[in-house]
Amino acid sequence: MTDTVQAGRRKFFDLARPSRQHLLGYILIAPAVLMVAAIIIWPLVLAIDLSFQQVKIPRLGGASRPFSVSNYTWLFSSEEFWLACWVTLKLVVVVTAGSVAVGLSTALLANNRFKGRTIARLGMALPWAVPEIIAVVIFAWMFDTSFGLFGWLAIQLGFTGQMIPWVSSSTAAFWAVAITMVWKGFPFVSIMCLAGLQSIPSDYYAAAKVDGANVWQRFRWITMPLLMPVLGVTLVLTLLWVFRDFSIIKVLTGGGPLRSTQTLSIMTYDQAFQYHNFGRAAAVGVLTLVICIVASLLMLGRRSKSIY
Amino acid sequence: MNKRMKRLALGAATAALMTMGSFAPAMADTVLKFISWQTDDAGTGEWWRSAIAEFEKQHPGVKIEFTKAERSSYADTMTTLFAANQPPQIVHLASFEFQMFADSGWLEPLDPWLKKDGIDMTGWAGQQKCEWNGETVCIMTNYFGFVMAYNKKILDAAGVAVPKTYEEFLAAAKATTKDLNGDGIIDQFGTGHETKGGPGQYLTEMLNYIIDAKAYWTDKDGNITIDTPEMVEGLTRWKTVMKSGVSPVDMSASDVRKLFADGKMAMRLDGPWLYGTTEKGSAKSDIVYAAPPLTPPLGGSSNVLAMPSDIPDDQKQLVWDFIKLTMTPEFQRSYATMGGNTPPSPKADVSGVEKTIPHFPILIQTMKEAAAAGIDRVPTGLELFYNEFSKMVMEETQRMIIQDLDPADVAKTMQAKAESIKG
């Protein structure tokens, strides 16, 4: 009898049996799932909970405040929030478009055969390899209003007679941030596009050439349609990166002047650590998350049609 | 299989025993955490270390873990530590940021500790700023007055005398701002103001001109006093200085100080801490310290020491012992001799400090003048909203400069917004 029970238990825990293989899978991924839950889901739940409380500085394990929607009421009636949304949208459009334009162009260039192609590809990926904070500090020096390289170049090339106030002019500050972000972001687009380009069979181009298609026609009717699946995912990832990026803006302009570079992520930080309004900061963070999810779903939902 | 498991278990047990063994002596000590942004400051950092060494000598088995957090992210770090229930036992904060912690009830009231040891705080510079809701929640560590440092060689070359008034200061700054090599880029500035260090620092720089125009943000009862003719004059002066190009723009404090220390700037209005930078600069021999031409001198409380309210009582006693040690006449004297700072204690003997720091009497003089005039960077009644208030003032001032607005209109806007912030 005992032997029968033991055999039954052994059978139940026999993870090699085909009917138990899914169990083994769950056991193997359990530590990772628990870890993700601990470091992502739990803080997310805390943030959502916090956004419905009127709290200045919360304390871990402290008593909760009563449920309130005042943070969201304040947010939707706040001029600052809508301005931050507008700045974020502008930055997302400009930086994503810029990164895709530069990234795709460099990928097309690096996809050709020429002398020094390996070095060119390495150079192309270099900005991506440089840690973000180091890249931003270097750009901050180059955009320095008093002694910066870009101002000096503008004078030498005759574009202006004096140094450009990159960080104390609303328009210039926005472009300083956008240029830095494009420089940091284009290599990712470039690498992804290059991988996509290399997966396009060369036969298609050869056949198109035989049919008399010129360069533009080959790009328009072969390269772009076949690159769209890769480009779509890349666009979403770039968009999310611009949405959540904090360090570039914080180091270069701090969100100023006159909030011309204050995005939702900078606003979240300011509400939490400058004004000590953690409830409001959590509300901005939660709304940013919702916007990101909606934008990603919209973009990923548009599956590119394959024409071949 | 069994053998291998046994070996593994034995190995793990040995490793665990050895690890625990190496931790044992460390666990025997009481460790007090002390986070500061001043660990590497020339002079001041050494002074803190000397106080720690003396404390550890007096308290065998107790160690102070002295860790640096950058000033730029200091408030964030402390907020996070307090929010996570992990505050350092020795709390070091800037005088414009402790109020939020005190208001949350996280700082221990120090009156019973002062009373128990019979410490009289009468005459302790800036100590009244440490009172929150009628209780003493901190000890003022530093109270300072601004001085003017100037480069004698540059002023002499421009044929300009050392300025004594705002008008002379502006004229001297204009006369010494030059493009020396003719490449279209200014490479020698008349003066320098930090405008990139955040709203609090921006307000400090502006305040030099505003208090010289006899204006201030609030009165002693906490009423907003921005929409006044004096404030309009102060804002006009700041706008004039910033628009005339006599100061580099968008620079951090350390960059501005470095430019001055290396002989690329004629005059700099700053606190006692400038001396550490000028001593290391290439123009060290040309730099002279004097009383500032803008009066009363800008000054006020700088930083405070406190203790968290929810640490165990035995730790509170140790923290209090450390705070008390820094308040002794000996350490107040070495705060001057070693750190080059103006000690807040009225009992501090600062005689002979001028032998090592020649301009020390000027530092004492400006500190006393600032204290007598009741000058402080944190406006009464706006302590809890200082960050929000300073950001508003910085933005409206930037708008005034960028969009060339009338200072009178800007003062009206600031008044309305400040009243709204105060609620």
Image (cartoon, coloured by chain):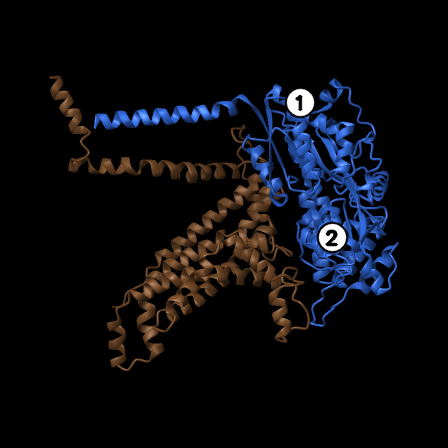
Chain colours: A brown, B blue
Task: Left or right? Give the position of A71 relative to A12.
Answer: right
Task: Tell me which amino acid carries mark 1.
Answer: Gln
**Chain for numbered disc 1:** B
Taking B345 as reference, is A248 above or below it? Answer: below
Q: Residue at x 68, y 34 (%)?
A: B48
Task: Left or right? Give the position of A13 relative to B334.
Answer: left
Q: Give the crowd class for mark 2: few <14, some 14-19, many >=20 residues within 10 Å.
A: some
Residue at image mark 2: B413
* Between B306 and B227, the one nearer to me in the picture: B306
Residue at image mark 1: B58
Q: Position of residue B379 (x, y in %)?
A: 76, 41
* Between B9 and B83, the one nearer to me in the picture: B9
Sequence-earlier tag: 1 or 2: 1
Give the quadrant of the C terminus of chain A.
Answer: bottom left
Taking the image as drawn, is residue B396 in sight?
A: no
Q: Position of residue A197 (x, y in %)?
A: 32, 66
Q: How many marks?
A: 2
Q: Position of residue B238 (x, y in %)?
A: 78, 56
Q: Residue at x 71, y 62 (%)?
A: B403
Task: Left or right? Give the position of B10 relative to B211.
Answer: left
Which tag is nearer the camera, tag 1 or tag 2? 1
Q: Give the crowd class for mark 1: few <14, some 14-19, many >=20 residues within 10 Å.
A: few
